[in-house]
Structure formats: structure tokens, C-alpha cells
Image (cartoon, grey):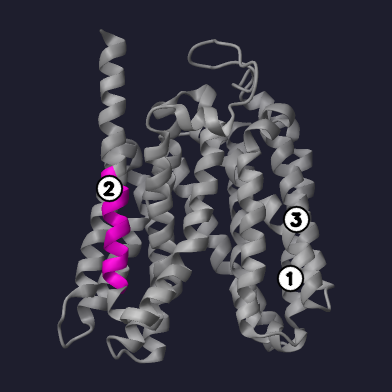
Amino acid sequence: MYSLLLSIIYFAFISLGLPDSLVGAGWPVMHDDLGVPIAYAGIITMIIASGTIVSSLMSDRLTRKLGTGLVTALSVALTAAALIGFSTSGSFWLLCLWAVPYGLGAGAVDAALNNYVALHYSSRHMSWLHAFWGVGASISPFIMSYALTEGLGWASGYRIVGIIQIALTVLLFIAIPLWRKVNPGIPQDHDAQEGAPITKPLSLRGALRIPGVPLILLAFLAYCALESTAMIWSATYLVQDRGVTVETAAAFASFFLLGITAGRFLSGVIADRLGDRQLIRYGFLLIGVGALMIALPLETSVFALAGLVFAGFGAAPVYPAIIHSTPENFGRHNSQAIIGIQMAAAYTGSTLMPPLFGVLGTWLGMWIFPFYIIVFVILGLVMTERLNGLVARRKTESAA
């Protein structure tokens, strides 16, 4: 049963990644069909991100009331409905309407599954699970490409992914009894470490008062800011500032995402040996090395291209390790609420920071790209190291 539930969670993480790349993959055709400017993609993604932030903040209350299994099933069902809605939309404003459940479904399942895995599975499984998110995020552009090249239209791309999500929803509803059979007495009503009853969900204000929570939120925002900025702007930087051909830049920009996915599979092998703190520390340092390689003022672009791959590998363990360390840093009874808030911080960083770079890059020049990344590397590293010191002092005081 343990292995069966783990397999289902793996599929759920693939499902989590599937919708994430669809808007970007289909928009070059969609905006023409809908008769709207290409910049309107930002409106869609902002609505999705807003819904994701809201449902992430509500995840603690929802999971305590419904359980992880039911929240996961309902969230995937909501996402499936939104994807089918996209496939039937003939106007931009209908897309905006369906973007609301699109985002709400993503945030709740993300926070619920991440907390469940952090509580009940080892660090290596967290790394591998997030690698499967990368698999899902990489598959969906190919599905959209197939729909477009075969003359089926962008709506068919959404419909295909929606049908996959519906099939997974059925599987998740069937599997709901497994969650409690595998982990009976899980900490939805009691703290598994302390045996203390949980009387009510932890509020946002209450969570922010816990020492160290603001530190990890800033670190998580920093990581997601640099990740999304690199994914969106690296190809433009390579072309405009380093004189790389469009084809080569596009290939290496995709290597950043592939580096994250492959790196998570590889880091899962050593995750339990190194531990979450070391994975976070070395991950940020490797991203910094990659950014410095990109910034080197050399005539050849080889170091810049290699630096982008280095940065992708460095980024691989940071997100999963931050999530997995949350129960240890803040207590199992607080982890669901804090992971939900971390998800909100993550989506805030990935939504707001790339457009900010776009403004700064237009004003100052694309040359600032690696230095923009380095700023967030320093912020993330400083915040996580301060948290490590805080947690170590807390453990020393408890032991005394």
C-alpha cells in the first residue's frame, strides 16, 4: 500500500506540472484567434497566480477539514474543469473566467501534497517528486505542439490535458481510502511529534509570529524569483547581450529547466545523505557560480552557456529541500499552514520579479541579468543560513 500511494502521489505531481506550461506554449496562436494583443497573456497568468496564492493560504484550513486525499482529488478536478473550460472558450474574457479555478486548483493541491510528503516521506522522495513536476511541465508544450502541428487547434491541446486530468481525478477519488490506511492517525487532528491536539488552523498572522518564518518566506521568494526570471529571460539575455544565435539561446534556455529536472533526480540519490540544509546551501552556491560564469566578460559565450546549465543543476534541490525541512524547522503541527504560506510567497516571487527584471533590463540593459540572479542568490543564502542558526539555538535551548 505504501508503494501504491507513493505511485499515486508521483502521478499527482506530474498532473501538477502539466497545466503550468500550456498558456505560454499556446499563446502565440491563441492571441491571434482571440483577437487580443500578445501582452494579454500577462493578464491570464496574473489571474492564475492570484488564485494559486489564495488557495495556498487556505490550504491549512481545507486540509484539516477534508484531509489530504480529498483536497488533492477536488483540486485536480477543479483544474480539469478549468482546462476543459479553456478548450471551449471563444473569447478572452471567458479565458479570464476559467483562469480563476485554474489557479485555485493548483495552489491547494501543491500545498497539501508538499506537506504530506514532507511529513511522511524522506528527502529523496521530495526531490524525485518535484522532478516529476518537471516531467509534467515539459510534456504539456509537446502536447500543445502536437495539437497545433496536426491542425487540431490550441483548444485541442487544452482538451487533451484536461482529459488526462479527468482520468487522474477518477484515480485520486478511488484512492482516497489509501491515505489513512497507509498513515493512520496522521497529524490532522494531533501533532505526531508532541501528541498535542490542534484546536484550530494556524492563521497567517500567527504563522508570521513564529521565529524564522519570515526568513524562510524571503528565501523561498528569492529562489522562485531567480528561477522564473532565468526561465523567462535567459534566452533574451543570451541573444541581446552575448550575441548568441536565437536557436542556440533557445536550446540552452530549455537546458535550464531540463537541468532542474535532471538535477532533482540526481539530488534525490544523495538527499538523505547530505540533508536538507546542505542541499539548500550547496544549491544556492552552485546557482551563484553559474551566474558568475554567465557574467564573465569574455569574447566567447561558452562560459555563459555552461553557467546557465550549472545554475539549473544548482536550482534543482533548493525548492524540494526547503519544503521538506519545514516540519523539522517549525513543528509538524505547523507545517501545513507554513507550507501554504511558502507556496504563496513562491508564487508572489515568480509572478512579480520577472516583470521587474523586464523593466530594469529595458532601462539599464540586459547585461544586468546575471547580477539580478546573484542578488536573489545572496538573499536566499543569507536568509536560510540565519534560519539554520535560529533552529540550532532553539534545539540547544530545548536540550538544556
Q: Is residue 182 left or right of residue 172?
A: left
- For marks 2 and 3, the one nearer the N-term is 3
In the image, is residue 13 part of the stretch drawn in magenta?
no
Q: Residues within 10 Å of mark 3 (few under 14, many from 20)?
A: many
Task: Check the image and report above or below for 399 versus 240.
Answer: above
| Vertical arrangement, residue 27 with respect to residue 357, above or below | below
Q: Which mark is residue 381?
A: 2
User: Quick check: can you spot residue 236?
Assistant: yes
The residue indicated by pointer 3 is 101
Magenta segment boundaries in residue numbering: 369-382
Q: Please tell me which of labels 1 and 2 falls first in the chain.
A: 1
Amino acid type shown at disc 1: Tyr
Q: Secondary structure at mark 2?
A: helix
Mark 3: amino acid:
Pro
Q: Nearer the viewer, residue 299 or 366?
A: 366
Q: Quadrant of residue 73?
A: top right
Task: Name which residue lies at 31% across and 41% down.
Answer: 384
Give residue 173's position: percent from left, percent from top.
78, 41
Give the Cα separation between the discs numbered 3 and 1: 14 Å
Vertical comparison of 259 with 236: above or below: above
- In the image, residue 354 lies at what x, y percent? 45, 68
Q: Residue 13 got which mark?
A: none
Q: Secondary structure at mark 3?
A: helix
- Residue that label 1 marks: 158
Q: Main secondary structure of the magenta part?
A: helix
